Amino acid sequence: MAVYDDARGLLAHRLHSQIALHQAYGGVVPELASRDHVARLLPLVREALAAADSTRDSIDGVAYTAGPGLIGALLVGAGFARSLALAWGIPAIGVHHLEGHLLAPLLEAHPPEFPFVALLVSGGHTQLVDVRGIGEYQILGETLDDAAGEAFDKTAKMLGLPYPGGAALAQLAEGGRPGIFDFPRPMLDRPGLDFSFSGLKTAALVALRGRELNEEVRADVARGFQEAVVDTLAEKARRALAATGRRRLVVAGGVGANRRLRERLLETARGAHAELYFPRPEFCTDNGAMIALAGCLRLKAGERGSGAVSARAHWALSEVGAPRASP
Ligand code: KG4
Ligand code: ZN
């Protein structure tokens, strides 16, 4: 939940993480997620408004995530946001989750100008996007199977780390030695901007088979795995900059919080005479601030939302479209 002001920027943001709720199950349990959203939404709105020193009278619109994702959880948020907007007599703007991610660097002090190339790496998506403006998104490449975050999480699980293990795997990798495990760099041997990470996960499984999982081996595998993912992402980002001629690279989504990835992308950007932009780690992973920002930009551009409760489990980023008065 967040309060965003177009002149003053982000006034407040609050996050209630459900990680502890789902951890025992090793993944998100849809029904538990929806129920927890119901319980948390109203208290979080009150908290965020108080922290922003704002009241409902100063709010001009309500932004919410309209998709893609788990439909039950989406419906809770969409129904709540639409009702709030109706009660307050203001528009409700449905935002695409990935649009929130790729605009998140605009929350920071030195935001990128359009156009830019975005590397979107989350638990559900891995995409390279040419961003020409709000809602002007061309997918340059995407994963053919697992998302980068999903590969991190599955490999982390093999290494005995709790869900979602991406950040914990990265931490483990810090103590690992380079070059002990040399995993494949999927799809680098052929042209194009698509990704594939499921083979890498299998390679990790094969490497671990029959080995004693001591601390050293786990750290070395984590290091080798992370290097392979990061190398692949960096090389595809380099190709995307070359193909489009863009001079700005944005990295966003949960995996964008990865320190080694940022390091490698800085080198990539430097080599391409481009500038790298990324949100602070807490705005890489899912958050309300990025949705508030995207909704605010759409509201300013004239979008008013329909009266409908909009929630879509499947929604391609390329279908989003520029802001418009009525959908
Ligand atoms: O964007 P996000 O919060 O949720 C989705 O929209 O999917 O991304 C979550 C993903 C998880 O797979 C998580 O393990 C991964 O981001 N992640 C990381 C790191 N922090 C979060 N992966 C690698 N290194 C990290 N530091
Ligand atoms: Zn996300």
Image (tube, rainbow, N blue to C red):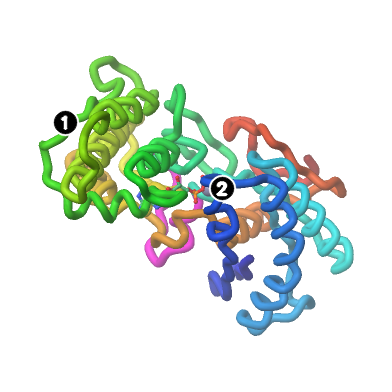
* 107 falls in the magenta region: yes
- The residue that appears at 29% across and 23% down in the rendered structure is 186
Label 1 sits on residue: 182
Q: Which range is magenta?
A: 103-117
Residue at 59% in and 66% down: 16
Report the Cα–Cα distance between label 2 and label 1: 31 Å
Give the residue type that dot 2 points to: Tyr
Horizontal side of 181 relative to 163 (left or right) equals: left
Q: Residues within 10 Å of mark 2 (few under 14, many from 20)?
A: few
For residue 25, which numbered disc appears in the image? 2
- Residue 203: give x, y in percent of width and height: 28, 26
Work out whether mark 2 precedes mark 1 in sequence or the reverse, and give the earlier one. Answer: 2
Relative to the observer, which residue lies in front, 23 or 196?
23
Examine the rendering and report whether any part of residue 318 can be seen: yes
Q: Residue at x 55, y 45 (%)?
A: 27
Is 156 rendered above or below residue 285?
above
Q: Secondary structure at mark 2?
A: loop
